[in-house]
Image (cartoon, grey):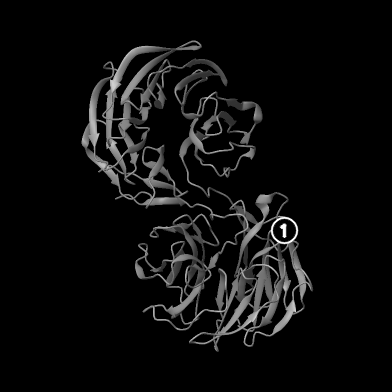
Amino acid sequence: MPHPWRLFASLPQVERGVSKIIGGDPKGNNFLYTNGKCVVIRNIDNPAIADIYTEHAHQVVVAKYAPSGFYIASGDVSGKLRIWDTTQKEHLLKYEYQPFAGKIKDLAWTEDSKRIAVVGEGREKFGAVFLWDSGSSVGEITGHNKVINSVDIKQTRPYRLATGSDDNCAAFFEGPPFKFKFTISDHTRFVNCVRFSPDGNRIATASADGQIFVYDGKTGEKVCALGGGKAHDGGIYAISWSPDSSQLLSASGDKTAKIWDVGANSIVNTFNMGSNVLDQQLGCLWQKDHLLTISLSGYINYLDKNNPNKPLRVIKGHSKSIQCLTVHKNGGKSYIYSGSNDENDGFSGKGHTNQVSRMAVDEMDQLVTCSMDDTVRYTNLSKRDYSGQDAVKMDVQPKCLAVGPGGYTVVLCIGQIVLMKDKKKCFAIDDLGYEPEAVAIHPGGGTAAVGGADGNVRLYSIQGTSLKSDEKSLEAKGPVTDLAYSHDGAFLAVCDANKVVTVFSVTDGYAEHNVFYGHHAKIVCIAWSPDNEHFASGGMDMMVYVWNVSDPETRVKIPDAHRLHHVSGLAWLDEHTLVTTSHDASVKEWSISYN
């Protein structure tokens, strides 16, 4: 069974005005965040090394390592808390609890990894604290009358617990068993984050009012307000202590992050992250020498103390579901391009304003994409920028396209087929009498195959600047979802909603060559290997199969290629490397071998 040998992980899923928690690793190697139903674990020194945990049934909000480093606890919007193993690739589930019904917003472990506090927006209560192995309660989290956003537990004895809430208050608890001691009402807006220093001497609270207050970690007495009055010009979403407890990193909606010397109550650094609304800072983590922040764009920034205006590195990628992808070979190197609706693809200029439905690379090294924003765009891959003059407006929403030799592009819009040559519309066929769903152009040019929702594939010939129907149709086994010609033009593979792939032999007048059964649900994408003998299909059953065109019985199976999300796109890098994308916003590379 193939294993992905490379995984391009998704970015954190973020929303405006909501703080994003990055979990640190007690061993210092990794960091954690969530996207959709996934928990993403990345190596902090080399973030290209990543792992994804996909066992939550609902959107995950927060994930944190136990201080022992052996387990991770993650909480989702339904109130489920899962505690799972970090040492094995399988991430076996150790315990699952439902502390309350409603979104879990934050969690904290005691330093012995035996107790967990969970807070959020439950219907009957906003928090719970219990033993990790039995779920038995070890105290009550009371004292708030609105959603609790943040919780932390002092990592030295005697234990203390603190919470921050939308009721503009923080609360202080002693235990175990944890009992409410008093409310701290210094803030005037929502309290977004509360964190004890690693040595337990201090606790800091950060709020939407732009203030950070510091208190004694043992007694809860106020020590100071950082910066005297306001610490930031905007709301503060996250704070993180330095490992030696002397400094504090803060992330704010004013598009800056700051480092504070807490003892001297002074600013050490101010990091200006930009002027765009997407540069608002929603999360931060100080781990070893690494200072990380998360922007509203989803980008992960590694801050540079020596150069506050330019991060050491910025990790980009997708944070929303990926709809399609293509591969482009340039100078012996292969590049993977993937399309989504989060505009995060490393091109300068303005991109599509909505979900990208389909993409292909033409012979002029242009990435041709169509989108729900009703345009077809031609992007020069050598320049890598979206240039405005190369966006062509369609009359109706485009949903699929194919590129062919001679500068031709055939675009399928709703109820319409459009032929384009050299980036200009030159011909359109309306009144089709069927709904076109997928298109491919023969590698030799001259013929376009269009698959319809009625289960037929119709052939059209490209003649100069017009498109003529060949009055020839091929029968698939159900509504056509995708189709593709082999690279040598010998075969046309068609996949359909009835879980079947049909391959037609082009040289034999499009006679049916073979039929392939195996998927358990609708097949949504198909791609030929460069060897012209194998092709891959991906389906709603989360399976990817690699088939041999001459023998439907021999196949390579990749089960659960993307757990919990169906495969949305396939492409081959070379004869033995397949790339898959999915609505889980990740891109995976698989090594394929035929025995």
Nearer to me, 105 or 204: 105
Identify the residue under disc 1. Answer: 254
Nearer to me, 586 or 539: 539
Q: How many marks?
A: 1
Compared to residue 563, the image places residue 224 above or below, namely below
Horizontal side, residue 344 vs residue 209: left or right: left
Residue 508 horizontal/vertical position (percent): 26, 17
The reply to whether residue 546 is in sight is yes
**Secondary structure under the numbered disc 1 in the rendered image:** loop
Nearer to me, 432 or 577: 432
Q: Which residue is drawn at 26% across and 29% down?
A: 477
Q: Which amino acid does label 1 sit on?
A: Asp
Image quarter where the C terminus lies is top left
Compared to residue 234, the image places residue 173 above or below, namely below
Residue 200 horizontal/vertical position (percent): 60, 83
Q: Which residue is drawn at 54% across and 62% down?
A: 44
Residue 172 horizontal/vertical position (percent): 60, 82
Residue 184 horizontal/vertical position (percent): 66, 79
Quarter-of-image position of residue 443: top left
Horizontal side, residue 505 vs residue 375: left or right: left
Compared to residue 20, the image places residue 568 above or below, namely above
The reply to whether residue 532 is in sight is no
